[in-house]
Image: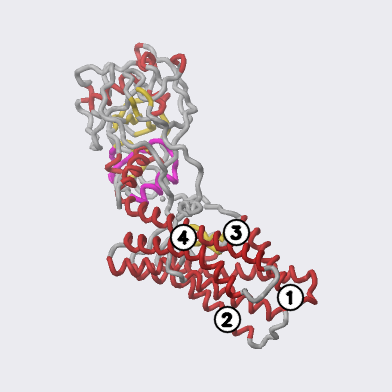
Amino acid sequence: MDVSGGSGQPRSGNDESAGPRAHPTAPAADDPADAGRPEPTGPTDTGPTATGPQTPGGGAPDPDTPSPDTPSPDTPGPQERTPPGPGETPDATAAAHDGPGRDAPDAATGEPGPGAGGERDTSAPSRTPSDGDRPSEAPRHRAEAHTRGGDGPGRPPRRRPEPGGGLLMGRPFGVPVYVAPSWFLVAALITWVFGGQLDRVLPELGAARYLVSLFFAVAFYASVLVHELAHTVAALRFKLPVRRIQLQFFGGVSEIEKEAETPGREFVLAFVGPLLSLVLSGIFYAALLPVEPDSVAGVLLAGLMVSNLIVAVFNLLPGLPLDGGRMLRAVVWKITGKPMSGTVAAAWVGRALAIAVLIGLPLLTQSLGSQSADDVGMDTVMDALLAAILAAIIWTGAGNSLRMARLREHLPELRARALTRRAVPVQADTPLSEALRRANASGARALVVVDADGTPASLVREAAIVGVPEHRRPWVPVSTLAQDLTDGMRVSAELSGEELLDALRANPATEYLVVEETGEIYGVLSAADVERAFVKAMARPS
């Protein structure tokens, strides 16, 4: 079984951005010094306003305001957090996220405003400017960003954190293979159960039967790894990135980060795993023919033959998240032309399959073993427990597949260009009150600190503005509220969907400078805005 985990799932945020709101100290007329400055082309919205809680005592803004995480698609996972959740995460793969803060009243007007986190900033010490520091005439600035490094103008360097997920066993084909801690539990269970069977077939082994049983457990999971490597090789052949392979309590998971482009590729990608398990079963059967059945080698080969046959047949059942469910999804996708229709059909079949396993497996095993004898009660309890675990895994996996499908369906709606806030360039020594006045006058909602040449140097954090009381803003320079720009905080205005989320997740921050391919400033992107847009998109029906 493999799980197509997203690059990371976006997590919940607030629903909407705040509407236009004039700053209480803003004069009626615009600053004449701004007349000749190039006009940013980003979406028009309100300027950075005094939203959120004030700092007690009228002091400087609190530098320890927490920063919201950037939204992330790993976790049928995907991550995993497979996808999350599944597992990962998607991804996997994922730290806990509290989301942006709750809306708090405006510091000056009492109106509600969007809460947002902030990051500790030590780039510049707080100081109180003299009267001479207040600019009576704002200099003109070039709206141009200079990108140092990265993958192109405004694109952050592609840096993927190690996914983790247990004990690293190796990197076949460059894909990390992990053994989850739960595997050791199932290995001990297999050793105990198979050891009891060996005691009946080969009683002369004595205590050594448990060593043979442990070897069987390791060999069985090696077969599962071959099954997952079949998925991995097929995915890499179709140029689909594989995040990791993880051996877990019940089998393994190949976390494929992207969806196959065609139903034909989806079918092949799902079918190769059970096919390899059938091939392994045939190989063990052929190896068993010249071996004495009542020998250690004969018992091991027979066990591996049967276990691989069971793995193949079980994974061919037509319900998500099993490989047979993905094959069914590909067939429905091919017939309807809609991948979402295939996912819905295969997921509901998967849920029906979970109910069938829950009820049917104990009845089947009881009927097959009705003539054997003494410990029927214990066997019935174990069969029911096994059926409940398998049914829960299938039911949960089907639900995760539906959620991941909805996520991928709505990801293209996340576009950096549409979510970017209009920004106003200001110099480092500009008082916060003056910077806010300029932003409100031009209908902007973000501030970019530039040097004397107009090159962007840092971004004024919204959370830091929130913490400055109204009466102190004329005495607080914007440089004390800004975070220095790094290459990863420059993103292209053309990014959207998974590419946008990958860029933000690779370089977590609260705000990002959005630039055109030519290098011109387009505006500022808030991570909280991306989260809110994703939650709003996911709330709409598919």
Reading the chain from its start, which is encountered first: label 3 or label 1? Answer: 3
Most extreme residue toward the bottom is: 290
> Which residue matches tag 4?
3
Judged from the image, the secondary structure of the residue bearing numbered disc 3 is strand
Work out whether residue 201 or residue 82 is closer to the camera in this orientation and state it: 201
Note whether 404 is above or below 371 in the view shown: above
> Which residue matches tag 2?
283
Q: How far apart are marks 2 and 4 (CA)?
A: 27 Å
Q: Distance between the residues labelled 1 and 4?
A: 39 Å
In the rendered structure, does residue 311 fall within the stretch colored magenta? no
Expressed as whole percent of the image width and height from the top left, the position of residue 197 reads: 70, 73
Label 1 or label 4, whichever lies nearer to me, is 1
Which residue is located at x 20 percent, y 28 percent?
Answer: 36
Reading the chain from its start, which is encountered first: label 2 or label 4? Answer: 4
Q: Residue 200 carries which label?
A: 1
Three-letter amino acid code of the residue under disc 3: Val
Three-letter amino acid code of the residue under disc 2: Ile
Three-letter amino acid code of the residue under disc 4: Val
Label 2 or label 1, whichever lies nearer to me, is 1
Three-letter amino acid code of the residue under disc 1: Arg
Judged from the image, the secondary structure of the residue bearing numbered disc 2 is helix
Q: Distance between the residues labelled 3 and 4?
A: 16 Å
Expressed as whole percent of the image width and height from the top left, the position of residue 151 reads: 38, 50
> Which residue matches tag 3?
179
The answer to whether residue 345 is left or right of residue 378 is left
Extent of the magenta region: 497-522
The answer to whether residue 32 is left or right of residue 349 is left
Reading the chain from its start, which is encountered first: label 3 or label 4? Answer: 4
Specify few, some or many for label 2: CA neighbours under 10 Å numbering under 14, 14-19, or 20 or more.
some
Reading the chain from its start, which is encountered first: label 2 or label 1? Answer: 1
